[in-house]
Image: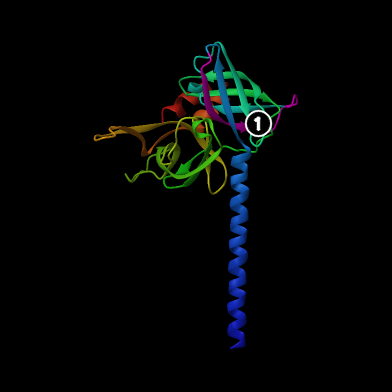
Amino acid sequence: MLRIGLAILLILLATSCASRNEIEAKNQIIRIALDSTVQLFTERQCGVTRAGSGVILGPASETGRVQVLTSAHLLEPVEDQSITALSPPSHDRLPATLLGIDPEADLALLEVDGLPTGNVTLADTANLGDRIWVVAFPWGRERTVVSGVVSSIHAAEPHTDGRAALGGHVRLIDASVSYGMSGGGIFSQQTGQLLGLVRGYRSAELSFSGAQSGSLTLPVAGETTVISTSRIRCFLSQTQQDVCGEIATQ
């Protein structure tokens, strides 16, 4: 009986250690996503303000400025506006400079002085059903983590036996998003790598009648569109335009 008791105790200890290690690994991965996410604001001379999200790319340059990737539609039209970035828990808005923009790919690159450095890396592909986190700022408010899965891909290569491909560039996810989350990072729950940016979402309007008639707009499950890492790599690499054209149309 003593041996059985010791064996059970060892199993419980091993299970506890494994669970603790899994929690620590998960926390490390989500910390990468949190530390690489910034909130963005644009303000025009007419007083109109927009809010969005962005991802810090790599370490700071020699000047201490970091580059931030976001969606182009947040900044269009680019004239007559000021752009600022905010990284929690700081409440200071830091001025951002627009380095480049590609409306077709819906990508823009900013440079900001004073932001903490990110540690994000890009994943080339993902598989259908892979679990993801979206880290962004819905409605221009607090930073939020939303869970979901990869729901649609651009297959890198078709299966020769006619079966559906399981892996490729991410096209759609099922995580529910809203205004202010455009440009937010989509991160792998397994590795913490960036799988793409939130581009937009399809919504459905539900109408109801009665004493309090009105309508309710809801995001459609599985229809959050993604700017894939293949497009991001093309945007960041101006010397590979021919290759970019091939990748973007897959």
In the rendered view of the protein, which quadrant contains the N terminus? bottom right
Q: Quadrant of residue 3?
A: bottom right
Q: Which of 84/63 is in front?
A: 84
Residue located at (62% from left, 44% from top)? 31
How far from the left and from the top, in percent, is residue 232? 53, 29
Residue under pointer 1: 91
Find the residue positioned furthest to the bottom. 1
Q: Which of 67/160 is in front?
A: 67
Find the residue positioned furthest to the right. 62
How far from the left and from the top, in percent, is residue 212? 29, 34
Q: Which of 83/17 is in front?
A: 83
Q: Is residue 206 magenta?
A: no
Q: Which of 171/53 is in front?
A: 53
Looking at the rendered structure, the secondary structure element under dot 1 is loop
Residues shaded magenta:
47-64
Q: Quadrant of residue 225?
A: top left
Residue located at (58% from left, 30% from top)? 39
Residue located at (47% from left, 43% from top)? 126
Q: Is residue 53 magenta?
A: yes
How far from the left and from the top, in percent, is residue 16? 60, 66
How far from the left and from the top, in percent, is residue 12? 59, 72
